[in-house]
Image (cartoon, rainbow, N blue to C red):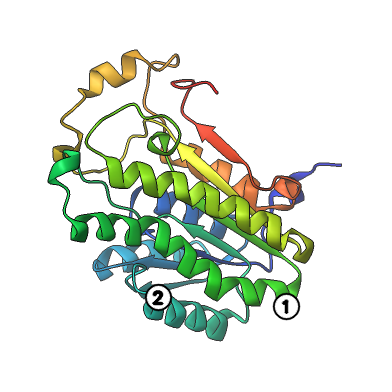
Amino acid sequence: MITDKSFRLDGRVALVTGSGRNIGRAVAEAFANAGAKVVINGHKDQAALDDVAGGIIQRGGECLPILADVSDDAAVGRMVAQTVEAFGSIDIVVSNVGIRKYRAFLDITPDEWDEVLRSNLSASFYLARHAIPHMRERKFGRFIVMSGADGFWGHVTHRAPNLAAKSGMHGLAKAIGREFGPDGITANTVSPGPIDTVRDWSQYVHRKPEDVIAEVPLRRYGHVDEIAGTCLYLASAAGGFTNGQVVHVNGGNLMY
């Protein structure tokens, strides 16, 4: 029977990357409100992390902010080790960091290509390889990657590295869900549609905000809490039989 407890995360430890603002922050706060001990992560804005952590702690939660570059395998390893040292385990990982660059294909340099893949796809791999051994010990794990429409619908040009990375992230989730399902570990993808977030609009010159809204049946941008709610479902007991799937949260903008 589904009850309120089905969506609780009491006793769980969650690591959410890119959680100083926007979707990552909403996910971290939702997990903390559901009873999880939360590690939040960012690359350079310590003040933003401290603000998120302070709010969670003020509301009675437990939170550890860690600055780390998730495109660096060694840094991810240290962050996972800090998480386990602080809270005794790691049960839930949300890979949320990523960068997008609007660049014509023939103008993309190898360094730019590598930078986008490292921050999206490789970061997810690094998180998984360091966290999964701890999950296997407890016979429980939830691994969630944050993709997007770019990974499933080639709706814009000039984003080849992002399309490749986001598609690869869902492939990685499926591989993890298949191989480690017997260990009680699920892996899924959340694909946000048009969400109201703080962003670098210079990388979105191809579309006007009002044109985006016109294509969404609900005629609005999504809220970060609506993405957080999806992640909470996947991380909780209620989502325990969902594995290797992608959940599109886009207001009907795209219907698969």
Q: Nearer the viewer, residue 154 or 183?
A: 154
Measure the alpha-carbon separation of dots 1 and 2. 22 Å
Q: Nearer the viewer, mark 1 or mark 2?
A: 2
Classify residue 106 by image quadrant.
top left
Residue farthest to the bottom, as pictured = 85
Secondary structure, mark 2, is helix
Residue farthest to the right, as pictured = 1
Above or below, 179 relative to 222: below
Instruction: Look at 50% across and 52% down and name the residue there.
Output: 145
Classify residue 117 by image quadrant.
bottom left
Instruction: Quadrant for the C terminus, please.
Output: top right
Left or right? Give the position of 130 relative to 211. Answer: right
Left or right? Give the position of 133 relative to 15. Answer: right
Q: Nearer the viewer, residue 8 or 187?
A: 187
Q: Position of residue 112 (x, y in %)?
A: 20, 56
Residue neighbourhood size for the residue with mark 2, other residues' Cα within 10 Å, grouped as few (<14), some (14–19), many (≥20): some
Instruction: Quadrant for the N terminus, please.
Output: top right
Q: How many marks?
A: 2
- The type of residue carrying mark 2 is Asp
Disc 2 target residue? 73
Q: Position of residue 38 (x, y in %)?
A: 52, 67
Above or below, 167 relative to 41: above
Disc 1 target residue? 137
Instruction: Look at 28% across and 51% down and name the residue there.
Output: 99
Left or right? Give the position of 240 relative to 100. Answer: right
Mark 1 or mark 2, earlier in chain: 2
- The type of residue carrying mark 1 is Glu
